[in-house]
Amino acid sequence: MKTLLIGFLILSILLFIVQACALVSSKGTEVQPYQRLKREKKFEIRNYPEATMATITSEASSYKALGNTGFRKLAGYIFGGNEQKQQIAMTAPVL
């Protein structure tokens, strides 16, 4: 019984830490403004204004193969590696 109680306590502490980290990391994320057009129980329909989007093309045959190189290309562009040498805000949601 004592082992079960200790296990539950450790699991509770770990869950608290994960939730706290998620809360702290999401506070600094800029959110793109939107207008809610319709709200249902499990989804909502939103209208987002015009926005700048960065995309890449690749010959990768899987998501796993693209993950690292694709992210580096996008991150470089977003952090100023573009024609204007300007950073682009990383906003939520990420598409």
Image (spheres, rainbow, N blue to C red):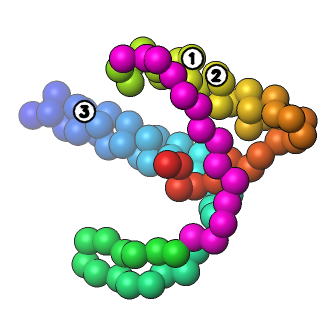
- Reply yes or no: does residue 58 show up in magenta: yes
Q: Which of marks 2 and 3 is in front?
A: 2
* Furthest-bottom residue in this view: 38
Q: Residues within 10 Å of mark 2 (few under 14, many from 20)?
A: few
Residue that carries the numbered disc 2 in the rendered image: 72
- Tell me, yes or no, if residue 29 can be seen here: no
The secondary element bearing badge 2 is classed as helix
Q: Which of 28 and 49 is in front in this view?
A: 49
The relative height of residue 61 versus residue 26 in the rendered view (above or below) is: above
Residue 24, image x and y in percent? 60, 49
Residue 9, image x and y in percent? 29, 39
Q: Which of marks 1 and 3 is nearer the N terminus?
A: 3
Q: Which of marks 1 and 3 is in front?
A: 1
Magenta span of residues: 48-61
* Furthest-left residue in this view: 1
Q: In this view, does 77 lie to the left or right of 66?
A: right
Residue that carries the numbered disc 3 in the rendered image: 6
Which residue type carries mark 2? Arg
Q: Residues within 10 Å of mark 3 (few under 14, many from 20)?
A: few
Which residue type carries mark 1? Thr
Say if mark 1 contacts mark 3, CB within 8 Å: no
Which residue type carries mark 3? Ile
- For residue 69, the mark is 1
Residue at the location (57% across, 17% down)?
69
